[in-house]
Amino acid sequence: MQDHTKKSQQYNNMFKFIHAADIHLDSPFGKLDLYEGVPVDDFRGATRRAFENLVQLAISEEVSFLLISGDLYDGDWQDYNTGLYLVSQIAKLRDAGIEVFIVAGNHDAASKITRTLRLPSNVKLFSNDKPATFHIEKLDVAIHGQSFPRPAVKKDLSKGYPLALNGYFNIGLLHTCVTGREGHEPYAPCSLDGLSSKGYDYWALGHVHNHEVLCNNPLILFSGNTQGRHARETGPKGCVLVTVIDNKQPKIEFKPVDVLRWEIISVDAQEADSGYEIVDRFNGQLEGLLNENPGMSLAVRVKISGETPAFDDILSDLERWTNEIRSVSLEKGDDKIWIEKVEFRLAKPISYKSLEKREGALGELLNLFDELKTDADAIKELAFELKDLEKKLPKELKYGLKEIDSKGPHFIGDLLKQVKPMLTKSLLQKRDRVK
C-alpha cells in the first residue's frame, strides 16, 4: 500500500482551483407562469448558462481542478438531457486538463438517473459509504470528502473525515448546514471547532446559497450557489477562485458567474406628496442598481413603505401604480429588467397628540396593538386565524399579496404596523363626525 504521509511540508508550488456548489442544473424555477411578463426562456436556461460561465472561468484561469460541494443537480429529474449536457461541459474541462471533484448533496442523492450516469474520466465522485481521500501527487494536494447517501442526512459527516495528511495541502469537501442557516434544511450539521480540528488548509462547503466566509484560519467557507433562483437569493452569485503559493495562506476571490440576478429595491415613501413622487424615488434607486450591475438581466422585487399623504391615492388604484413602476423599469432597463412583484406597505400619517391619554374604546384598541407586539402566542394564534381567512378570499383579491405564514411572526408584526394607523385613522374620522 502506498504511504501518502510525508515527513514535512514539502510542497513548493503555485496552483489554482475553483470552489463551487449548489449549481442545481435545470432548476425548474417553479410557478413562473403565475407571474406577468416573466422572461421564461431566460429563466429556464439560466442555470446552464451560469454553469457554462463556470467552465469557461476554470479554463481561462488555467485552474488545476474544480471542486463541487454538492447539489450539482436539482432533485429527481427524469430527463437524460440534463446529464448529457453536464457530460458535454465537463468534457471541455477534461480537454483542458482540469480535474473535477464532486460530493453529492441532498438534491443529488434524490436523483435516480445520476446513479447510472457515466461521467468523463476527469471526474472523481466521492463515495457515500464513508469518507475518502483523493490525492493529486504532482501538486501535493489531498482532497477529503463524502457524498450524501440519501436526501436527508442528519448526522455530522465531518466527524469521520481523516486528519490532515502531513506534507499535503489538505482540502475538505462537505455539503452541510454547519450550525444551521435560515431557509436551509439542517443537513449534516457540524461545528467550526470540529472542522478546524481536522487540520485542513481549506474547507469547501456547500448547501447554503449565500457566499460566506465562516473562518479565515483555516479557511472555511460557502461558495454560495452559481445562479439565484428566486427573490430570496439576491445579489451576485458565483464561485470562489483560490490561489495557493507554496505553503502560505490561500488567496480567495469571489467570481460571479450568474446570468440573471435577483435584487430588491426598497422605496421609502415617507412624506411623499403623491404617487408620482414615489415613482420618482423608485426611478432614482433603479438607476443606481443598473449602474451596479452593468449588462446584467435583473429580476426585481419592489417594496414601497412608509407613512405618506399619497396613501389614499395609491390604495385606490394599486394596479395603476404597479404599472407605473413597471413602465419606468421598461424605459430604463432596455428589456434587461423584470419587475417580479411590487409590494405596498403604506400607512396614512396620523397625529397621535389627541390620543395621548388613550382613554375610551380607541385607547383600549391602541393598547391591544402594543400588547400584541410582544405576545408571541397571540401573534401565532392570529396568524392561524388569518391563514384560514386567506383561503376564503377570491383569487382577484389575492393578487400581489404575500402569502400568510402562520410560523412567521415577522410577517404578522409588519401587518400590525400597517393596520394600526389605517384602523386608527378611520376610527378617528368617524369619532370626529359624531362630535
Image (cartoon, rainbow, N blue to C red):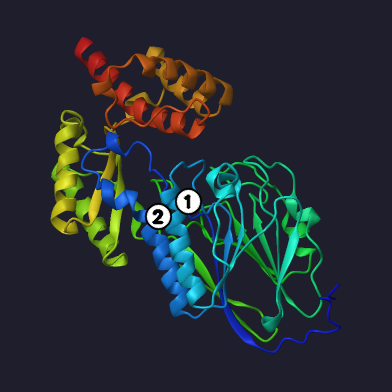
Q: Please state which of residues 74 and 93 is positioned toward the viewer in this rendering.
A: 93
Q: Quadrant of residue 389?
A: top left
Query: Which residue has dot 1 on it?
Result: 24
Q: Is residue 162 left or right of residue 150?
A: right
Label 1 amino acid?
His
Q: Please state which of residues 73 and 288 is positioned toward the viewer in this rendering.
A: 73
Query: Which residue has dot 2 on it?
Result: 47
Q: Are marks 1 and 2 in contact (CB under 8 Å)?
A: yes
Judged from this view, the residue extending furthest toward the bottom is 12
Residue 430 position within the rendered picture, expressed as x and y whole percent measured from the top left: 24, 14
- Which sits earlier in the primary sequence, circle 1 or circle 2? 1
- Under circle 1, the secondary element is loop
The residue sitting at 79% across, 64% down in the picture is 198
Quadrant of the image for the N terminus? bottom right
Residue 34 position within the rendered picture, expressed as x and y whole percent measured from the top left: 28, 34
Q: Is residue 17 left or right of residue 249?
A: left
The residue sitting at 42% across, 27% down in the picture is 404
Residue 274 in sight in this render: no
Question: Could you give the CA–CA distance between mark 1 and mark 2, rounded to whole angstroms?
Answer: 7 Å
In the depicted structure, whether residue 353 falls above or below residue 97: above
